[in-house]
Protein backbone atom coordinates (compact mmCIF):
# COMPACT_ATOMS: atom_id res chain seq x y z
CA UNK A 1 0.00 0.00 0.00
CA UNK A 2 0.99 3.64 0.14
CA UNK A 3 3.60 3.48 2.87
CA UNK A 4 5.04 0.48 1.05
CA UNK A 5 6.11 3.07 -1.52
CA UNK A 6 8.71 4.22 1.00
CA UNK A 7 12.24 3.37 -0.02
CA UNK A 8 15.26 4.22 2.02
CA UNK A 9 18.85 3.20 2.22
CA UNK A 10 20.17 3.87 5.68
CA UNK A 11 23.68 4.98 4.87
CA UNK A 12 26.19 7.55 6.01
CA UNK A 13 28.96 9.86 4.88
CA UNK A 14 32.15 10.68 6.72
CA UNK A 15 34.24 13.69 7.59
CA UNK A 16 37.95 14.17 8.23
CA UNK A 17 37.86 16.77 10.98
CA UNK A 18 35.61 18.73 13.33
CA UNK A 19 34.03 22.06 12.55
CA UNK A 20 36.14 25.16 13.10
CA UNK A 21 34.44 28.32 11.96
CA UNK A 22 37.71 30.21 11.86
CA UNK A 23 39.17 27.99 9.11
CA UNK A 24 37.88 27.56 5.55
CA UNK A 25 39.71 24.24 5.41
CA UNK A 26 37.33 22.90 8.06
CA UNK A 27 34.20 23.78 6.06
CA UNK A 28 33.36 20.24 4.94
CA UNK A 29 30.16 20.78 2.96
CA UNK A 30 29.78 21.07 -0.84
CA UNK A 31 28.86 24.27 -2.65
CA UNK A 32 26.18 23.55 -5.28
CA UNK A 33 25.30 26.23 -7.84
CA UNK A 34 22.47 25.93 -10.36
CA UNK A 35 23.05 26.95 -13.97
CA UNK A 36 20.53 29.78 -13.83
CA UNK A 37 22.64 31.35 -11.07
CA UNK A 38 25.58 31.64 -13.48
CA UNK A 39 24.05 33.49 -16.39
CA UNK A 40 27.37 34.41 -18.04
CA UNK A 41 28.29 30.72 -18.44
CA UNK A 42 24.99 29.57 -19.91
CA UNK A 43 25.38 28.13 -23.39
CA UNK A 44 29.09 27.41 -22.91
CA UNK A 45 30.66 24.03 -23.68
CA UNK A 46 31.17 22.22 -20.39
CA UNK A 47 34.54 20.78 -21.42
CA UNK A 48 35.90 24.35 -21.67
CA UNK A 49 34.92 25.38 -18.13
CA UNK A 50 37.49 25.34 -15.31
CA UNK A 51 37.35 26.25 -11.61
CA UNK A 52 40.33 27.95 -9.92
CA UNK A 53 41.33 29.05 -6.45
CA UNK A 54 44.26 31.33 -5.57
CA UNK A 55 46.66 30.42 -2.77
CA UNK A 56 49.57 32.76 -2.01
CA UNK A 57 48.98 34.55 -5.29
CA UNK A 58 49.12 31.39 -7.42
CA UNK A 59 46.13 29.93 -9.25
CA UNK A 60 45.38 26.21 -9.11
CA UNK A 61 42.56 24.21 -10.63
CA UNK A 62 40.36 22.58 -7.99
CA UNK A 63 38.16 19.46 -8.20
CA UNK A 64 34.66 20.22 -9.50
CA UNK A 65 32.00 18.63 -11.61
CA UNK A 66 29.06 19.78 -13.69
CA UNK A 67 26.12 17.39 -13.50
CA UNK A 68 23.61 17.84 -16.29
CA UNK A 69 19.84 17.49 -16.30
CA UNK A 70 17.70 16.99 -19.40
CA UNK A 71 14.51 18.72 -20.49
CA UNK A 72 12.48 16.50 -18.13
CA UNK A 73 14.74 17.47 -15.21
CA UNK A 74 16.24 13.96 -15.06
CA UNK A 75 19.94 13.57 -14.32
CA UNK A 76 22.10 12.78 -17.35
CA UNK A 77 23.82 9.59 -16.24
CA UNK A 78 27.47 8.89 -16.92
CA UNK A 79 26.58 5.18 -16.96
CA UNK A 80 23.08 3.88 -17.67
CA UNK A 81 21.87 0.52 -16.30
CA UNK A 82 18.80 -1.53 -17.24
CA UNK A 83 18.02 0.77 -20.16
CA UNK A 84 15.27 -1.57 -21.38
CA UNK A 85 13.25 -0.77 -18.23
CA UNK A 86 13.25 3.04 -18.29
CA UNK A 87 13.68 6.11 -20.53
CA UNK A 88 16.59 7.90 -18.82
CA UNK A 89 19.73 8.58 -20.88
CA UNK A 90 23.42 9.46 -20.84
CA UNK A 91 22.90 12.60 -22.92
CA UNK A 92 21.09 15.92 -22.48
CA UNK A 93 18.24 16.24 -24.98
CA UNK A 94 18.49 20.04 -24.62
CA UNK A 95 22.00 20.07 -26.16
CA UNK A 96 23.02 20.01 -29.84
CA UNK A 97 24.06 16.55 -31.01
CA UNK A 98 27.58 15.71 -29.93
CA UNK A 99 27.91 18.67 -27.53
CA UNK A 100 27.55 19.10 -23.76
CA UNK A 101 26.30 22.61 -23.03
CA UNK A 102 25.98 24.26 -19.60
CA UNK A 103 22.33 25.27 -19.25
CA UNK A 104 19.85 26.53 -16.66
CA UNK A 105 19.11 23.25 -14.86
CA UNK A 106 22.66 21.86 -14.73
CA UNK A 107 24.59 21.99 -11.44
CA UNK A 108 28.19 22.98 -10.73
CA UNK A 109 29.61 21.41 -7.54
CA UNK A 110 32.85 21.94 -5.61
CA UNK A 111 33.92 21.71 -1.96
CA UNK A 112 33.89 24.68 0.41
CA UNK A 113 37.35 23.85 1.76
CA UNK A 114 38.84 24.36 -1.72
CA UNK A 115 38.00 28.06 -2.00
CA UNK A 116 40.91 30.53 -1.87
CA UNK A 117 41.90 34.16 -1.69
CA UNK A 118 40.94 37.10 -3.89
CA UNK A 119 43.14 38.14 -6.81
CA UNK A 120 42.56 41.40 -8.68
CA UNK A 121 44.53 40.15 -11.69
CA UNK A 122 42.87 36.77 -12.09
CA UNK A 123 41.93 37.31 -15.74
CA UNK A 124 45.56 37.93 -16.75
CA UNK A 125 46.97 35.07 -14.63
CA UNK A 126 44.61 32.38 -15.89
CA UNK A 127 44.41 31.29 -19.52
CA UNK A 128 40.77 32.19 -20.10
CA UNK A 129 38.61 34.16 -22.48
CA UNK A 130 36.07 34.90 -19.76
CA UNK A 131 36.18 34.86 -15.98
CA UNK A 132 33.54 34.85 -13.27
CA UNK A 133 34.64 35.74 -9.73
CA UNK A 134 32.52 34.30 -6.91
CA UNK A 135 32.77 35.78 -3.43
CA UNK A 136 31.54 33.14 -0.98
CA UNK A 137 30.21 33.93 2.50
CA UNK A 138 29.38 31.27 5.09
CA UNK A 139 26.47 31.89 7.39
CA UNK A 140 25.55 35.01 5.39
CA UNK A 141 28.45 36.76 7.09
CA UNK A 142 29.24 40.28 5.82
CA UNK A 143 32.89 39.20 5.80
CA UNK A 144 33.79 37.06 2.74
CA UNK A 145 34.96 33.54 3.54
CA UNK A 146 36.84 33.12 0.25
CA UNK A 147 36.83 33.38 -3.52
CA UNK A 148 36.49 31.05 -6.51
CA UNK A 149 37.18 31.83 -10.17
CA UNK A 150 35.17 30.14 -12.91
CA UNK A 151 36.81 30.38 -16.34
CA UNK A 152 35.81 29.68 -19.91
CA UNK A 153 38.67 28.72 -22.22
CA UNK A 154 38.35 28.83 -26.00
CA UNK A 155 40.63 25.80 -26.44
CA UNK A 156 40.17 23.89 -23.15
CA UNK A 157 43.93 23.44 -22.93
CA UNK A 158 44.33 23.63 -19.14
CA UNK A 159 44.28 20.16 -17.51
CA UNK A 160 41.60 19.47 -14.94
CA UNK A 161 42.63 18.91 -11.34
CA UNK A 162 43.94 15.38 -10.79
CA UNK A 163 42.52 15.34 -7.23
CA UNK A 164 39.53 13.04 -6.84
CA UNK A 165 37.64 12.82 -3.54
CA UNK A 166 35.07 10.17 -4.49
CA UNK A 167 35.13 6.86 -6.37
CA UNK A 168 32.64 4.11 -7.17
CA UNK A 169 33.64 0.52 -7.92
CA UNK A 170 30.65 -0.93 -9.73
CA UNK A 171 31.60 -4.62 -9.61
CA UNK A 172 32.40 -4.48 -5.89
CA UNK A 173 29.30 -2.28 -5.26
CA UNK A 174 31.58 -0.07 -3.16
CA UNK A 175 31.72 3.69 -2.68
CA UNK A 176 34.83 5.30 -1.22
CA UNK A 177 35.74 8.76 0.05
CA UNK A 178 39.05 9.87 1.61
CA UNK A 179 37.80 8.67 5.01
CA UNK A 180 35.14 6.00 4.54
CA UNK A 181 33.93 3.10 2.45
CA UNK A 182 30.51 1.48 2.18
CA UNK A 183 29.15 -1.48 0.26
CA UNK A 184 25.71 -1.98 -1.25
CA UNK A 185 23.82 -5.14 -0.37
CA UNK A 186 23.63 -8.03 -2.84
CA UNK A 187 20.23 -9.12 -1.56
CA UNK A 188 18.29 -5.88 -0.88
CA UNK A 189 18.08 -3.14 -3.47
CA UNK A 190 19.33 0.32 -2.47
CA UNK A 191 20.48 -0.73 1.00
CA UNK A 192 23.93 -0.81 2.58
CA UNK A 193 25.47 -3.94 4.09
CA UNK A 194 28.25 -2.24 6.03
CA UNK A 195 30.29 0.90 6.48
CA UNK A 196 33.78 1.47 7.82
CA UNK A 197 36.06 4.36 8.75
CA UNK A 198 39.74 3.57 8.26
CA UNK A 199 38.82 -0.10 8.25
CA UNK A 200 36.81 0.12 11.48
CA UNK A 201 33.19 -0.98 11.24
CA UNK A 202 30.70 1.72 12.18
CA UNK A 203 27.27 0.30 11.22
CA UNK A 204 25.85 -2.84 9.66
CA UNK A 205 22.52 -4.45 8.82
CA UNK A 206 20.30 -1.40 8.32
CA UNK A 207 16.61 -2.22 8.76
CA UNK A 208 13.30 -0.74 7.66
CA UNK A 209 10.05 -1.73 9.38
CA UNK A 210 6.79 -0.11 8.36
CA UNK A 211 3.05 -0.31 8.86
CA UNK A 212 0.13 1.10 6.89
CA UNK A 213 -3.40 1.36 8.30
CA UNK A 214 -5.79 1.03 5.34
CA UNK A 215 -9.51 1.65 5.13
CA UNK A 216 -11.32 0.19 2.11
CA UNK A 217 -15.04 0.76 2.65
CA UNK A 218 -15.94 -1.92 5.24
CA UNK A 219 -12.47 -3.46 5.20
CA UNK A 220 -9.87 -2.24 7.69
CA UNK A 221 -6.41 -3.74 7.96
CA UNK A 222 -2.79 -3.02 8.93
CA UNK A 223 -0.11 -4.04 6.45
CA UNK A 224 3.45 -4.67 7.64
CA UNK A 225 6.63 -4.61 5.52
CA UNK A 226 10.41 -4.53 5.88
CA UNK A 227 13.50 -3.93 3.72
CA UNK A 228 13.46 -7.46 2.27
CA UNK A 229 10.19 -6.67 0.48
CA UNK A 230 11.66 -3.67 -1.31
CA UNK A 231 12.49 -4.52 -4.89
CA UNK A 232 13.58 -2.61 -7.97
CA UNK A 233 16.58 -1.89 -10.15
CA UNK A 234 19.41 0.58 -10.72
CA UNK A 235 18.89 3.21 -13.42
CA UNK A 236 22.35 4.76 -13.59
CA UNK A 237 25.00 6.71 -11.77
CA UNK A 238 27.25 9.76 -11.93
CA UNK A 239 30.77 9.12 -10.67
CA UNK A 240 32.40 12.52 -10.23
CA UNK A 241 35.40 13.73 -8.22
CA UNK A 242 33.18 15.64 -5.74
CA UNK A 243 29.98 13.60 -5.51
CA UNK A 244 28.43 10.33 -6.61
CA UNK A 245 24.74 10.08 -7.48
CA UNK A 246 23.07 6.68 -7.81
CA UNK A 247 19.48 6.42 -9.00
CA UNK A 248 17.08 3.56 -8.29
CA UNK A 249 13.54 2.71 -9.31
CA UNK A 250 11.95 0.86 -6.39
CA UNK A 251 8.70 -0.78 -5.42
CA UNK A 252 7.31 -3.06 -2.71
CA UNK A 253 6.36 -6.68 -3.26
CA UNK A 254 2.99 -6.86 -1.52
CA UNK A 255 1.59 -10.36 -2.07
CA UNK A 256 0.42 -12.79 -4.75
CA UNK A 257 2.40 -11.03 -7.47
CA UNK A 258 1.00 -7.60 -6.57
CA UNK A 259 3.48 -4.75 -6.21
CA UNK A 260 3.26 -1.09 -5.26
CA UNK A 261 3.67 1.88 -7.54
CA UNK A 262 7.30 2.48 -8.54
CA UNK A 263 9.24 5.34 -6.97
CA UNK A 264 12.42 7.08 -8.12
CA UNK A 265 15.12 7.77 -5.53
CA UNK A 266 18.59 9.36 -5.67
CA UNK A 267 21.40 8.40 -3.27
CA UNK A 268 23.93 11.24 -3.12
CA UNK A 269 27.41 10.76 -1.64
CA UNK A 270 29.80 13.63 -0.82
CA UNK A 271 33.30 13.42 0.70
CA UNK A 272 32.00 14.19 4.19
CA UNK A 273 28.24 13.69 4.28
CA UNK A 274 25.36 12.07 2.46
CA UNK A 275 21.76 12.98 1.75
CA UNK A 276 19.17 10.27 1.18
CA UNK A 277 15.51 11.02 0.48
CA UNK A 278 12.74 9.20 2.34
CA UNK A 279 9.61 9.51 0.16
CA UNK A 280 6.23 9.10 1.83
CA UNK A 281 2.98 8.80 -0.12
CA UNK A 282 -0.59 8.75 1.09
CA UNK A 283 -3.79 8.13 -0.86
CA UNK A 284 -7.48 8.17 0.03
CA UNK A 285 -7.46 4.58 1.35
CA UNK A 286 -4.64 5.11 3.86
CA UNK A 287 -5.49 6.29 7.36
CA UNK A 288 -2.09 6.41 9.08
CA UNK A 289 1.48 5.29 8.48
CA UNK A 290 4.49 4.56 10.67
CA UNK A 291 8.06 3.52 9.98
CA UNK A 292 11.21 2.62 11.91
CA UNK A 293 14.66 2.99 10.32
CA UNK A 294 17.66 1.73 12.25
CA UNK A 295 20.98 -0.13 12.12
CA UNK A 296 23.31 -2.10 14.36
CA UNK A 297 26.49 -0.51 15.66
CA UNK A 298 29.65 -2.06 17.20
CA UNK A 299 30.13 -2.89 20.88
CA UNK A 300 32.99 -0.40 21.13
CA UNK A 301 30.77 2.58 20.29
CA UNK A 302 28.53 4.47 22.66
CA UNK A 303 25.27 5.85 21.35
CA UNK A 304 23.65 8.97 22.69
CA UNK A 305 21.38 11.81 21.80
CA UNK A 306 21.87 15.43 22.96
CA UNK A 307 18.17 16.23 22.53
CA UNK A 308 15.28 15.53 24.87
CA UNK A 309 13.34 13.38 22.40
CA UNK A 310 15.71 10.40 22.69
CA UNK A 311 14.10 7.22 23.99
CA UNK A 312 16.13 4.41 25.54
CA UNK A 313 14.35 1.16 24.68
CA UNK A 314 14.78 -2.53 25.44
CA UNK A 315 12.92 -4.20 22.58
CA UNK A 316 12.97 -2.48 19.19
CA UNK A 317 10.76 -5.12 17.58
CA UNK A 318 7.80 -4.24 19.81
CA UNK A 319 8.47 -0.70 21.00
CA UNK A 320 6.43 2.14 19.54
CA UNK A 321 8.28 5.26 20.72
CA UNK A 322 6.41 8.28 21.94
CA UNK A 323 6.74 11.01 19.32
CA UNK A 324 7.39 14.67 19.92
CA UNK A 325 6.82 17.70 17.65
CA UNK A 326 9.52 18.31 15.07
CA UNK A 327 12.27 20.78 15.99
CA UNK A 328 12.78 22.81 12.81
CA UNK A 329 16.27 24.00 13.71
CA UNK A 330 17.71 20.68 14.89
CA UNK A 331 15.64 17.66 13.78
CA UNK A 332 15.78 14.25 15.49
CA UNK A 333 19.44 13.28 15.62
CA UNK A 334 21.42 10.24 16.76
CA UNK A 335 25.13 10.40 17.63
CA UNK A 336 27.50 7.43 17.74
CA UNK A 337 30.82 8.01 19.46
CA UNK A 338 34.05 6.12 20.20
CA UNK A 339 37.62 7.17 21.10
CA UNK A 340 38.77 7.38 17.45
CA UNK A 341 35.73 8.48 15.43
CA UNK A 342 32.11 9.56 15.59
CA UNK A 343 29.06 10.19 13.46
CA UNK A 344 25.68 11.82 13.58
CA UNK A 345 22.57 11.07 11.56
CA UNK A 346 19.55 13.33 11.39
CA UNK A 347 16.04 13.05 10.00
CA UNK A 348 14.88 16.23 8.25
CA UNK A 349 11.15 16.85 7.79
CA UNK A 350 9.75 19.52 5.40
CA UNK A 351 8.21 22.58 7.06
CA UNK A 352 4.97 21.86 5.19
CA UNK A 353 4.49 18.73 7.31
CA UNK A 354 4.96 20.44 10.67
CA UNK A 355 2.27 19.24 13.05
CA UNK A 356 1.24 16.50 10.63
CA UNK A 357 4.06 14.06 11.22
CA UNK A 358 5.96 13.35 14.44
CA UNK A 359 9.36 11.78 14.86
CA UNK A 360 11.92 10.78 17.45
CA UNK A 361 15.34 9.17 17.66
CA UNK A 362 15.84 6.03 19.72
CA UNK A 363 18.60 3.69 20.84
CA UNK A 364 18.75 0.22 22.31
CA UNK A 365 21.69 -0.61 24.60
CA UNK A 366 20.32 -3.86 25.99
CA UNK A 367 22.51 -5.09 28.87
CA UNK A 368 22.76 -8.73 29.86
CA UNK A 369 22.87 -9.90 33.48
CA UNK A 370 26.68 -9.89 33.47
CA UNK A 371 26.75 -6.27 32.28
CA UNK A 372 27.77 -7.06 28.69
CA UNK A 373 25.88 -5.94 25.61
CA UNK A 374 24.72 -8.25 22.87
CA UNK A 375 25.95 -6.95 19.51
CA UNK A 376 22.65 -7.76 17.85
CA UNK A 377 20.85 -5.61 20.42
CA UNK A 378 22.92 -2.44 19.91
CA UNK A 379 20.63 -0.52 17.61
CA UNK A 380 20.06 3.17 16.86
CA UNK A 381 17.55 4.78 14.56
CA UNK A 382 14.44 6.87 14.00
CA UNK A 383 10.72 6.38 14.32
CA UNK A 384 8.13 8.51 12.55
CA UNK A 385 4.34 8.40 12.41
CA UNK A 386 1.74 10.42 10.55
CA UNK A 387 -1.10 12.25 12.26
CA UNK A 388 -4.75 11.98 11.26
CA UNK A 389 -4.47 15.29 9.39
CA UNK A 390 -1.55 14.13 7.23
CA UNK A 391 -2.39 15.28 3.67
CA UNK A 392 -2.73 13.07 0.61
CA UNK A 393 0.10 13.19 -1.91
CA UNK A 394 3.80 12.41 -2.07
CA UNK A 395 6.38 14.10 0.18
CA UNK A 396 10.09 13.78 0.69
CA UNK A 397 11.96 13.65 3.98
CA UNK A 398 15.77 13.58 4.16
CA UNK A 399 18.21 11.49 6.13
CA UNK A 400 21.52 13.34 6.45
CA UNK A 401 24.56 11.57 7.90
CA UNK A 402 28.03 12.86 8.73
CA UNK A 403 31.10 10.99 10.01
CA UNK A 404 34.37 12.15 11.53
CA UNK A 405 37.72 10.61 12.43
CA UNK A 406 37.47 12.56 15.67
CA UNK A 407 35.10 11.98 18.62
CA UNK A 408 32.20 14.12 19.81
CA UNK A 409 31.16 15.49 16.43
CA UNK A 410 27.59 15.97 17.71
CA UNK A 411 28.77 18.70 20.09
CA UNK A 412 29.52 20.97 17.12
CA UNK A 413 26.04 22.47 16.90
CA UNK A 414 27.12 25.16 14.41
CA UNK A 415 28.32 22.46 12.04
CA UNK A 416 25.06 20.54 12.36
CA UNK A 417 23.06 23.70 11.61
CA UNK A 418 25.26 24.47 8.59
CA UNK A 419 24.70 21.03 7.08
CA UNK A 420 20.94 21.32 7.62
CA UNK A 421 20.43 24.86 6.34
CA UNK A 422 23.16 25.15 3.67
CA UNK A 423 23.58 28.60 5.10
CA UNK A 424 25.82 30.44 2.64
CA UNK A 425 25.62 32.98 -0.16
CA UNK A 426 27.81 34.45 -2.88
CA UNK A 427 28.26 37.48 -5.10
CA UNK A 428 29.47 37.26 -8.69
CA UNK A 429 31.40 39.54 -11.01
CA UNK A 430 32.10 38.89 -14.70
CA UNK A 431 35.18 39.86 -16.74
CA UNK A 432 36.27 39.17 -20.33
CA UNK A 433 39.35 39.71 -22.49
CA UNK A 434 37.01 41.32 -25.04
CA UNK A 435 35.02 44.49 -24.31
CA UNK A 436 31.43 43.67 -23.38
CA UNK A 437 28.34 45.49 -24.50
CA UNK A 438 26.00 46.90 -21.88
CA UNK A 439 23.66 43.96 -22.47
CA UNK A 440 26.46 41.42 -21.91
CA UNK A 441 27.85 42.86 -18.70
CA UNK A 442 26.96 41.01 -15.52
CA UNK A 443 26.69 43.46 -12.61
CA UNK A 444 27.86 42.60 -9.12
CA UNK A 445 24.94 40.92 -7.40
CA UNK A 446 24.21 38.82 -4.34
CA UNK A 447 22.76 35.37 -4.88
CA UNK A 448 21.55 32.72 -2.46
CA UNK A 449 22.61 29.12 -2.93
CA UNK A 450 19.30 28.03 -1.42
CA UNK A 451 17.24 29.04 -4.44
CA UNK A 452 17.71 30.45 -7.97
CA UNK A 453 17.91 34.23 -8.29
Image: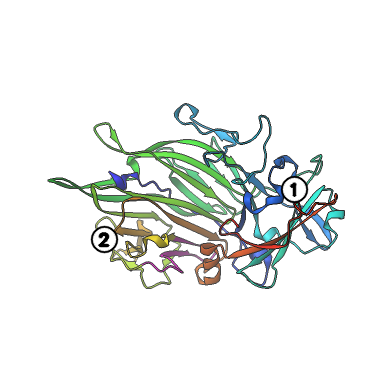
- Is 433 part of what is drawn in magenta? no
Which percent across, then down, holds residue 223? 23, 46
Please give the residue where the numbered disc 2 appears in the rendered image.
320
Near-viewer residue (153 or 224):
153
> Can you see residue 451?
yes
Say which of marks 1 and 2 sits in front: 1
Near-viewer residue (363 or 29):
29
Q: Is residue 49 above or below residue 253?
A: below
Tell whether 70 sits left or right of 65. left
Residue positioned 72% across, 65% down in the render: 146
Which percent across, then down, holds residue 299? 42, 60
Q: Secondary structure at mark 1?
A: strand
Span highlighted in magenta in the image? 326-346
Quadrant assignment, res 54: bottom right
| Farthest right residue in view | 124
- Category of crowding for the residue at label 1, using alpha-carbon neighbours closer than 10 angstroms: few (below 14), some (14–19), many (at least 20): many
Please give the residue where the numbered disc 1 appears in the rendered image.
50
Residue positioned 52% across, 66% down in the render: 416
Near-viewer residue (39 or 70):
39
Q: Secondary structure at mark 2?
A: loop
Q: Quadrant of the N terminus?
A: top left
Q: CA distance from mark 1 to mark 2?
A: 52 Å
> Can you see residue 13?
no
| Farthest top residue in view | 84
- Is 334 part of what is drawn in magenta? yes
| Farthest left residue in view | 218
Which percent across, then down, holds residue 242? 63, 49
Q: Quadrant of the C terminus?
A: bottom right
Quadrant assignment, res 369: bottom left
Amino acid sequence: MTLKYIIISFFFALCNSLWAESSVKDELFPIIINGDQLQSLLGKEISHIRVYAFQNGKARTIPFQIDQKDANNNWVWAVVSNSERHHMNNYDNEDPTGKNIFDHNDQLVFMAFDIGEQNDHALTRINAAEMLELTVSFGNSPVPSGWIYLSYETSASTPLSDVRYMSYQKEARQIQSPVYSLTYSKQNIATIDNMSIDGQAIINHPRIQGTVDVNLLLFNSTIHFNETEINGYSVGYIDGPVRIIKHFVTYIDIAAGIKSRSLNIDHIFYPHHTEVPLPISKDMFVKNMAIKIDAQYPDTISCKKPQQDLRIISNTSEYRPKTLPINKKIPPLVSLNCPTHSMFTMLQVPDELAGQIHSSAYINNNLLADGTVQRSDKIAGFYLATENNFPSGQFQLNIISVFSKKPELCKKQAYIARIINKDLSFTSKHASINPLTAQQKLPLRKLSLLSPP
